[in-house]
Amino acid sequence: MPLEVFGRDPYKTLVSTILSARTRDEVTLKISQNLFKHAPNLKTLRNLSQKEIEEIIHGVGFHKTKAKHLYELAHQIDKVANTREELMELPGVGRKTANLVLNRAFKIPAIAVDTHVHKISNLLGWVHTKTPEQTEMELNKIIPKKYWSDMNKLFVSMGRKFNTKKRMEEFLKENNLI
């Protein structure tokens, strides 16, 4: 994932992950890098107006909503929290984003369940769930913690390569996984 270039910087990890929703990785990376030239930390992000943020991040999906979220979170916090609960209190941050921030920035194991993790886990028969949150809870019970942080990266990669249910099922069958 290109966003891993931001390493263990909690601010850049949080912001780039918020920007990544409904946006292609290469677009997110380019726009995140541009935003970080203007606002390399929370303090400098706080100095930008919502309109300035909007203009800088134009090109990501839902840029006006994301600009509002970034503006609000910059005024809410002085540093990025390292707990799921605190992260999820921030505007624009749900479980998946919180878990990705915990993994990438703080090396705290958490399963970030997106559509790929949810669908593939169900196809494999590991879980029988209806929602990503249910999937996360069930996977937490059966997957050893040492693998949690890698699941999202692996399953997203598979989901992008085998991008229809039919292609995914063929791949899983060919490899004797289902």
Image (cartoon, rainbow, N blue to C red):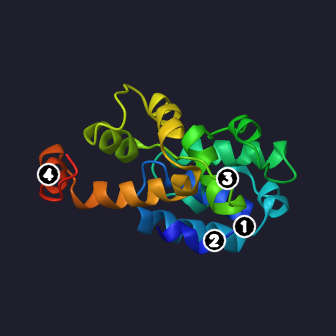
Which of pointers 4 and 1 indicates the residue nearer the eye? 4
Decide: marks 4, 1 in contact (CB < 8 A)? Answer: no
SS at mark 4 in the image: helix
- Tag 1: amino acid: Asp
Which amino acid is tagged 4? Answer: Lys
- Residue that label 3 marks: 102
> Depth check: 173 or 74 in front?
173
Residue 160 image offset from top left, x and y in percent: 29, 58
The amino acid beneath tag 3 is Leu
6 up-or-down from 77: above or below: below
Residue identifier under label 4: 173
Q: Quadrant of residue 11?
A: bottom right
- In screen coordinates, is 111 left or right of 87? left
Estimate the spatial distance between the alpha carbons at disc 4 and disc 1, rounded to whole Å: 39 Å
> Sequence order check: which comes first, mark 3 or mark 2?
2
Question: How far is the residue under mark 2 from the one under mark 4?
Answer: 36 Å
Mark whose residue sits in front, 2 or 4: 4
Secondary element at tag 1:
loop
Q: Is residue 86 left or right of residue 64?
A: right
Residue pointed to by mark 1: 9
- Tell me, yes or no, whether the two marked residues, 1 and 2, touch with CB atoms within 8 Å: yes
Q: Give the residue displayed 72% in from the left and 47% down from the top.
A: 71
State how far apart marks 4 and 3 are (Cα): 33 Å
Q: Is residue 68 left or right of residue 3?
A: right
Identify residue for label 2: 6
Q: What residue is rendered at 46% in x and 67% in y?
A: 1
